[in-house]
């Protein structure tokens, strides 16, 4: 089990590059949707981790960003203010950042990601995550050891 009383030796920041399976739209402030989608992914990939993270009134043991679009900041602000949707296309990748606030979570997330990537590839690759109504495949995972948060 994970020891949540001790402070982590290191924080881990992972960038997940995602590609939508089809054209669509998504709200620009999708952080809570991303968090829920990651918990749903963990439910199938690593149910014991998802149960631990989700049960009770524990403090959040990881954070995640909203989906990062390839748009100028002013366009993002306008979409947020207008409560609008932004376009997604399978010709682009989009990034989310996950920060693990407990060092002990890294091997668990790493194992879940490796297990997922060991699944079928090519045209049989299953969707990695669903954010809102949009399905995404996992293109790449980036862990930078030079990240200043560590």
Image (tube, rainbow, N blue to C red):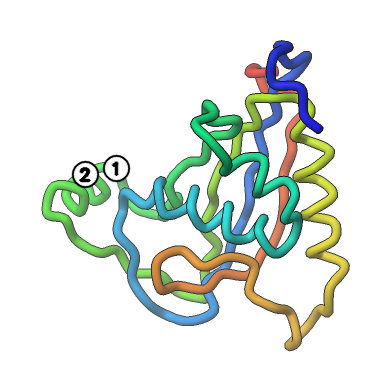
Question: Going 63% across and 25% down the picture, which residue do you hit?
Answer: 101
- Say if 31 sits above or below 2 in the image: below
Q: Position of residue 8 (x, y in %)?
A: 73, 16
The answer for how far apart the CA atoms under marks 2 and 1 are is 6 Å
Residue most extreme to the bottom: 123
Q: Position of residue 26 (x, y in %)?
A: 34, 64
Mark 2 Cα within 10 Å, few/some/many (few <14, many 20+)?
Answer: few
Question: Going 40% across and 47% down the picture, which residue do you hit?
Answer: 32
Question: Going 29% across and 63% down the picture, which residue do you hit?
Answer: 86
- Answer with the quarter of the image where residue 24 lies: bottom left
- If the image is split into quadrants, where does the N terminus sit? top right
- Answer with the quarter of the image where residue 109 lies: top right
Q: Which of these two is toward me, 49 or 18? A: 49
Q: Which of these two is toward me, 33 or 24? A: 33
Q: Which mark is residue 73?
A: 1
- Say if 37 sits above or below 55 in the image: below
- Evaluate if marks 2 and 1 touch, with contact meaning CB atoms under 8 Å apart: yes
- Answer with the quarter of the image where residue 15 lies: top right
Q: Element type at marker 1?
A: helix
């Amino acid at each position: 089990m994970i020891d949540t009383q001790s402070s982590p030796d290191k924080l881990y920041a992972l960038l997940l590059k995602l590609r939508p399976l089809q054209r669509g739209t998504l709200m620009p402030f999708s952080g809570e949707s991303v968090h829920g989608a990651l918990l749903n992914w963990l439910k199938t990939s690593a149910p014991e981790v998802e149960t631990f993270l989700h049960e009770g009134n524990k403090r959040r043991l990881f954070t995640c960003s909203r989906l990062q679009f390839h748009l100028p900041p002013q366009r993002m602000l306008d979409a947020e203010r207008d409560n609008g949707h932004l376009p997604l296309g399978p010709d682009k990748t989009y990034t989310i950042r996950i920060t693990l606030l407990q060092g002990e979570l890294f091997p668990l997330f790493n194992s879940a990601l490796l297990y997922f990537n060991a699944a079928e590839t090519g045209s049989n690759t299953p969707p990695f995550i669903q954010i809102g109504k949009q399905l995404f495949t996992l293109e790449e995972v980036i862990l930078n050891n030079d990240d200043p948060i560590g």
